[in-house]
Amino acid sequence: MERLDKFLCDSGAGTRSQVKAMLKAGRVTVDGKVERDNGRKIDPNAQTITLDGEVLGGKRRIVAMLNKPAGFVTATEDANDRTVMELLPADLRKMDLKPIGRLDKATEGLLLFTNDGDLLHRLISPKKEVPKVYYARHEGAATEGDVAAFAEGLTLRDGLHCLPAKLEPLGAGESLITVCEGKYHQVRRMMASRNMTVTYLERRQEGALSLGNLPRGEVRELTAEEILALEN
Ligand code: URA
């Protein structure tokens, strides 16, 4: 539980005195009722707070995409490395977002976040099998034999089996790889099992979503249509 005025300030509504005036003017509601008491205790995760009819903080569902740069670990906290959370703008950092799945520290590209626990679990479930497209630069050339082995379903060097995947050689030492699962270091290990070493990896697409022209290191919220497409 926290004070309503503090919650409003933290949500970016204004300064303490501006928030007090907003409350006095009847512009704030808690669970549908106008609230004028700035000391009122609220639970932003369980209650809906609006300012001028707009839902604030806590319960607002957010799905956002980051174009992840190399050098950041996909974790909410880490003792040694910078985390992807540090790349979120201040207003989103307060929204209890969690990464959906993970990208290795060295991998760049599309990483989704949400504060909707149900959506998070649905999307990371192995049953969901969302196709993810990666661009890789690698040592060793991709052959027709490699393409066929990916399509059949690879066995990794440690004996783990992978679902059928797509390898599209683009040129010498460059390929697109589409996988529908998210095993640890999946693409790097798949390529290694065919004697190719990944030297650069970028996730470009996840289901219907693609990075588009989102600059590296930048975050944007998904549109309602994009969220809908993700859920289906
Ligand atoms: N596969 C990998 O090897 N690394 C990633 O970060 C994502 C997929």
Image: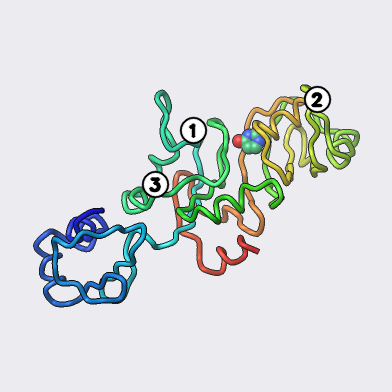
Which amino acid does the dot numbered 3 rest on?
Leu
Sequence-wise, the earlier of marks 2 and 3 is: 3
Q: Is residue 161 left or right of residue 115?
A: right
Q: Mark 1 points at which residue?
A: 73
Real-space CA distance between mark 2 and mark 1, rounded to the nearest whole angstrom = 27 Å
Residue at 73 percent of width and 46 percent of height: 180
Q: Classify 55 as above or below 90.
A: below
Q: Name the residue under label 3.
A: 88
| Foreground label between 2 and 3 | 2
Q: Helix, strand or loop at disc 3?
A: loop
Which amino acid does the dot numbered 2 rest on?
Gly
Q: Classify 7 as above or below 187.
A: below
Expressed as whole percent of the image width and height from the top left, the position of residue 115 reads 45, 53
Sequence-wise, the earlier of marks 1 and 3 is: 1
Real-space CA distance between mark 1 and mark 3, rounded to the nearest whole angstrom = 13 Å
Q: Classify 232 as above or below 106.
A: below
Residues at marks 2 and 3 touching, judged by CB atoms closer than 8 Å: no
Q: Helix, strand or loop at disc 2?
A: loop
Residues at marks 1 and 3 touching, judged by CB atoms closer than 8 Å: no
Residues at marks 2 and 1 touching, judged by CB atoms closer than 8 Å: no
Expressed as whole percent of the image width and height from the top left, the position of residue 154 reads 83, 34
So how many labels did they put on this image?
3
Q: In this view, does 187 lie to the left or right of 99?
A: right
Q: In which quarter of the image is residue 27?
A: bottom left
Please state, as top left, top right, bottom left or bottom right, where the C terminus lies in the image: bottom right
Sequence-wise, the earlier of marks 2 and 1 is: 1
Q: Is residue 114 left or right of residue 53?
A: right
Other residues around mark 2 within 10 Å, as few (<14) / some (14–19) / many (≥20): few
Q: Mark 2 points at which residue?
A: 159
In the image shown, does 158 or 71 lie closer to the viewer? 158
In the image shown, does 125 or 135 lie closer to the viewer? 125
